[in-house]
Image: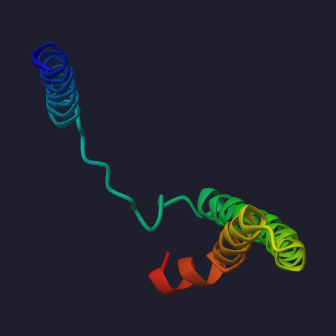
Amino acid sequence: MKKNFSKIKNRISAVAGTTAGAVSMTLANTMPVYAANSTGVPIVDKGMTIIKVSAIGICEIIGIIALVKGGMDFGTGVSQRDQSGIVQGAAEFGGGLIMAGIGVIIGLLGL
């Protein structure tokens, strides 16, 4: 028992030391980044807006596909009474729902 306790104690102390080191290095090397509403160059602002809207649209399209696939998997899991299929389908459905609604979420945040 003492031998196992010693091994567990050494592992916990190693993990704690590694975590403390990683956190301290991350905090020491962090530089704040501030987002701006405009670059001051109209053509660049227009291009960035087009890229932003396109990326949100692509994310929403993928979200709708995932939403449909998750719904189908969930329905299949329910009909087969497969617990893992139900959980998998519900997770896909939830992820698809979030991705499909990302435009609304970003709009509510004012970005």
Give the residue displayed 14% in from the left and 20% down from the top: 1
Which image quarter: residue 17?
A: top left
| Residue at position x 67%, y 67% in the image | 91
Name above or below for residue 40 compared with residue 20: below
User: Whole-percent x and y of residue 57?
Assistant: 77, 69
Q: x, y (%) of residue 81? A: 82, 74
Residue 97 lies, in percent from the top left, at: 69, 78
Q: Is residue 28 left or right of residue 111?
A: left
Q: Residue at x 31, y 49 (%)?
A: 33
- Given residues 70 and 25, the one toward you in this image is 70
Q: Specify whether 64 is left or right of 19.
A: right
| Foreground of the two, 85 or 81 | 81
**Residue 72 visible in image:** yes
Q: Name, please, the residue furthest toward the top.
A: 3
Residue at 65% x, 60% y: name it. Answer: 43
Up-down: is 22 above or below 32?
Answer: above
